[in-house]
Amino acid sequence: MLGRIVSALFTFLLLALPAAADPVLSNLHLIPDPPEAYNRVTIRAEYSGVEAPLKKLWVSLVREGREAALVSNDIDFLGPAGVLSRSLELNEPGPRILTLVVEDADGRRSATREMRFTVAAPPRPYEEVTYLSEGLKIRGYLYRPPGDARVPAVLYSHGSVERSDLATRRPTEWLGYRLSRLGYAVFVAERRGYGGSEGRGVIPGEGLIPFRYSLPSEVKDVLAAIDFLQTQPGVDGSRIALVGKSLGGLVSLLAAAQRTSLRAVVSLAGGYGFGDRGMDPDMLFVQEELRAAARRITIPTLLMHAQNDRMVPAAFSQMVAAELRERRVPVVEKIYPAFKVGGRAVDGHGMFDGLNGLPLFWKDLTTFLTVHLE
């Protein structure tokens, strides 16, 4: 389907050829990436006329009318002719300009003729819905797999945000769409106070009293989302798993302690913290809530954490795992090595934020879900 969309929505126009000394781009193709990435294509183009020795070869992809490059990276020099390849997200429609720039050993630059094409954003892969929790309207995003069969479901809970980001919608497409392609219905619920939902959620740094009273309310939003999901056509309400990141992992574990009918729960860096502040009253409160939940959870549990998480210590997951093992509840504990991006160590809490960390934990996540939802 995406291939037909791409062929219908993307066109390009080759401009006049430059002087013979300049490199040449030709045969531009826009290829849909694997089906788990609905909003991404790979740009492939052939180049020729490049003379060695080279210092640098890079591709510039810009939106027409903008100077800043959306993509500007070194690419491997394959010889005087070769193929360049770059990935492109389709979130922003509009015209694009692709240019190959060659810099020789003396610093002289030459550029190809421009290749122009037009991008149209694909249709959203989810349905926006609203459900009620304690009288508040809570917004959610429901992803459905292809077909009409009754399917298991995953309820995903996002993490906390800064006050300035509370109104930002978070359909979590990088996870929701991919899991839906594996045959799951995926429901991403924006708990109270976030995105398009009514009410007031947990705000980092607001102190013990707001957090102590807000956290149980957010757990109620997850419980109400479970009830809503069980009413949806095509969803097998007897096969639901909870997955949550950071604060969302915390509320998922607390909700799992109250719903023994769930099939499984997954915590991605679950807990709550403020970086280097240490064990303040909020974190002590979270620790006790998690320990109490671990003493009541009876369903299979997957706990995932990066070793170098500086926001929410991996000790939270280790504590829950120890409690579950003592009670012989099925638990899988995954503490990953220090998370790195581009070879550089970064805060491990970001491992579960999007595409950078996905290859590191995707197999563990999907294997666990397959075992307990099929």
Image (cartoon, rainbow, N blue to C red):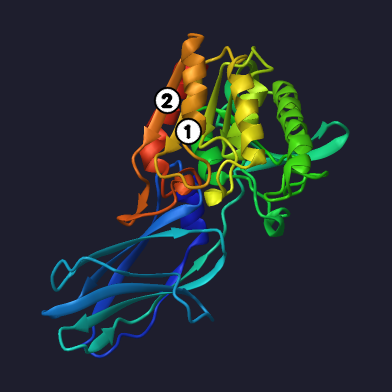
Question: Where 14 sits versus 234, above or below?
Answer: below
Q: In the figure, is residue 267 to the left or right of 131? A: left
Give the residue at mark 2.
333
Q: Nearer the viewer, residue 248 or 26?
A: 248
Please state which of the two labelled residues, at mark 1 or mark 2, is closer to the viewer.
1
Give residue 168's position: percent from left, percent from top.
Answer: 69, 54
Three-letter residue code for mark 1? Ala
Q: Secondary structure at mark 2?
A: strand
Which of 374/293 is in front? Answer: 293
Label 1 – label 2 distance at C-alpha: 11 Å
Q: Can the viewer see residue 80?
A: yes
What percent of the width, then of the height, locates residue 310?
Answer: 48, 47
Mark identifier at residue 180? none
Number of other residues with Cα within 10 Å of mark 1, as a class: few under 14, some 14 to 19, many 20 or more: some
Q: Position of residue 52 (x, y in %)?
A: 11, 79
Q: Earlier in the sequence, mark 1 or mark 2?
A: 1
Q: Secondary structure at mark 1?
A: helix
Mark 2 is surrounded, within 10 Å at the Cα level, by few (under 14), some (14 to 19) or many (20 or more) other residues, namely: some
* Relative side of 50 to 148, left or right: left
Q: In percent of the image, x 77 and y 38: which residue is there?
A: 214
Q: Is residue 150 visible?
A: no
Residue 315, numbered circle: 1
Q: Which three-letter amino acid code belongs to the residue tagged 2?
A: Glu
